[in-house]
Image (cartoon, rainbow, N blue to C red):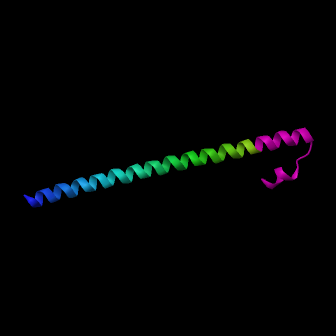
């Protein structure tokens, strides 16, 4: 009987560790997706502002050329 209880406890522990690992992986994937989207949006916004500044001045400027 004690052997069966030990197997059940071990099985439940494995199940909990598996669920915990899947949850951590899902969180990591979500964090990476949000970080990537934030970087992309930030770079697009910077290029937009630099483009507007370039059109106002009529020349490209050094700040814009640093990102090329």
Q: Residue furthest right?
A: 58
Q: Residue furthest left?
A: 1
Q: Give the answer, above or below, for where 57 lies relative to 3.
A: above
Q: Is residue 31 left or right of residue 17?
A: right
Q: Is residue 27 magenta?
A: no
Locate residue 32, reporting x and y percent.
54, 50
Q: Is residue 22 left or right of residue 15?
A: right
Locate residue 67, reporting x and y percent.
77, 53
Locate residue 23, reporting x and y percent.
40, 49
Residue at image point 83% right, 39% down: 52
Between 3 and 58, the one lying in front of the other is: 3
* Labels in figure, total: 0
Residue 51 occupies quadrant: top right
Looking at the rendering, the stretch of residues picked out in magenta corresponds to 47-68
Query: The N terminus appears in which quarter of the rendering?
Result: bottom left
Q: Give the answer, above or below, for where 7 lies relative to 55.
A: below
Q: Residue furthest bottom?
A: 3
Decide whether the magenta segment is chiefly helix, strand or loop.
helix
Residue at image point 49% right, 49% down: 29
Residue at image point 81% right, 44% down: 50
Residue at image point 11% right, 61% down: 3
Residue 8 occupies quadrant: bottom left
Q: Is residue 66 magenta?
A: yes
Q: Is residue 40 left or right of residue 11?
A: right
């Amino acid at each position: 009987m004690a052997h069966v209880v030990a197997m059940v406890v071990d099985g439940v522990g494995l199940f909990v560790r598996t669920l915990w690992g899947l949850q951590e992986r899902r969180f990591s994937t979500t964090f990476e997706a949000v970080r990537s989207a934030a970087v992309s949006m930030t770079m697009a916004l910077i290029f937009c502002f630099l483009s507007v500044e370039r059109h106002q001045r009529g020349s490209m400027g050094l700040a814009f050329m640093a990102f090329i």
